[in-house]
Image (cartoon, rainbow, N blue to C red):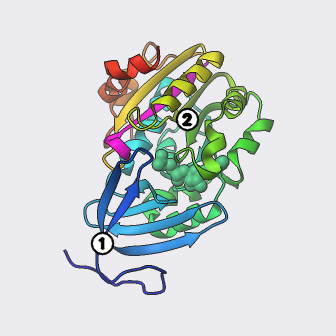
Amino acid sequence: QEKSEVNTDIPNSSKEDFWFTEYGPTNTSISLRVKYKLFEKETPYQKIEIFDSYDYGRVMALDGFIMLTEKDEFIYHEMISHVPLFTHPEPKYILVIGGGDGGAVREILKHKSVEKVELVEIDEEVVNASKIYFPQIASCLEDKRVEIKFQDGVEFIKSKKGVYDIVLIDSPDPIGPAIGLFEEDFYKNAFFSLNDSGILVAQSESPFVFPDLIKRVYSIFKKYFPIVYFYLANVPTYASGVISFILGSKKFDPLKNFDPERVRGFDASFRYYNEKVHLASFALPNFFTELLK
Ligand code: SAM
């Protein structure tokens, strides 16, 4: 494939293509061959890098960890959003913590019942860079139903009581500014920020890479929510290729209250999610359920 123009203003941009490697926490890495680096910035919170890769299109990494690629971002964003939004019969008021790329917000806005989405992102530079380098993902952030707050989600959620239909924790790995997004106090405050029929979904990492984290968040969610499930999706560029989500619900059950007809009759399209995937994503392999004992 042809290399296009290299922006030589960017530190470390290279005229030669190279392999970008994410060095995972468990001595396993994932590498993508990239044409060049498009963007790099050290913010007060993290290092943002954007590459143009051969196979996965543009790639955003934070502190060396892949957050999204153009080619497979739809999987994560559809699954974090539509599973809870199709579990709730009429989701209106949604909070997303993290998620400054706009992918989850784009999916949420497909639901006509949604009146307001608050996005609480700690790092304004993630939003700015996404608007420039991932416009097809981030342009939804201009929608009039969306309100963006550049703030720490851990602090933000403390003052919210009984307001949201759905809260999504679209966080990176538990490092740097995101550590607090995996703590019990934060999940507890997220529980209280929901109204009486609210649903909380958090990305809960890969069972191969973070099995102890999965055990821990499960025991925390069980303390607060009467209904708790994990569900899974396959994302090629996330460590081990599998990502789990934990769903805590105060009233609606994602299996028992799910109406497949609502998905079949929906007037927007999905590339990963459908009514069969919704149900199948809750089928956990034995090694995963072993973790929860
Ligand atoms: N889909 C990604 C993944 O799992 O790899 C996560 C998306 S990434 C855009 C998550 C965002 O969370 C980052 O932009 C980061 O700046 C933001 N973030 C990290 N800690 C945060 C905090 N305490 N409050 C709000 N946003 C936070």
* Magenta stretch bounds: 239-250
In the image, residue 177 sits, relative to residue 20, either above or below, namely above
Q: Amino acid at mark 2?
A: Ser
Q: Is residue 157 covered in magenta?
A: no
Residue at left offset 42%, top offset 54%:
68
Does the residue tagged 1 have its C-beta within 8 Å of any atom of ligand 1?
Answer: no
Q: Position of residue 259 (x, y in %)?
A: 41, 20
Residue 269 in sight here:
no
| Helix, strand or loop under label 2 | loop
> Tag on residue 18?
1
Q: Are marks 1 and 2 in contact (CB under 8 Å)?
A: no
Q: Which residue is mark 2?
A: 113
Expressed as whole percent of the image width and height from the top left, the position of residue 73 reads 38, 50
- From this viewpoint, which residue is outermost toward the bottom? 8
The residue shown at (32%, 84%) is: 15
Q: Position of residue 225 (x, y in %)?
A: 61, 18
- Callout 1 crowding tier (Cα within 10 Å): few <14, some 14–19, many ≥20: some
- Decide if residue 14 is in sight here: yes
Amino acid type, residue under disc 1 in the picture: Phe
Q: Of all residues shown, which one is farthest toward the right?
A: 159
Q: Nearer the viewer, residue 151 or 204?
A: 204
State which tag comes first along the sequence, 1 or 2.
1
Dominant secondary structure of the residues highlighted in magenta in the image: strand
- Please name the residue shown 58% across and 67% down the image: 128
Q: Position of residue 151 (x, y in %)?
A: 72, 53
| Residue 31 against residue 90 in the figure, above or below | below
For the residue labelled by badge 1, is the local secondary structure a helix, a strand or a loop? strand
Answer few, some or many: residues within 10 Å of disc 2's Cα (few below 14, many 20 plus, some between 14 and 19).
some
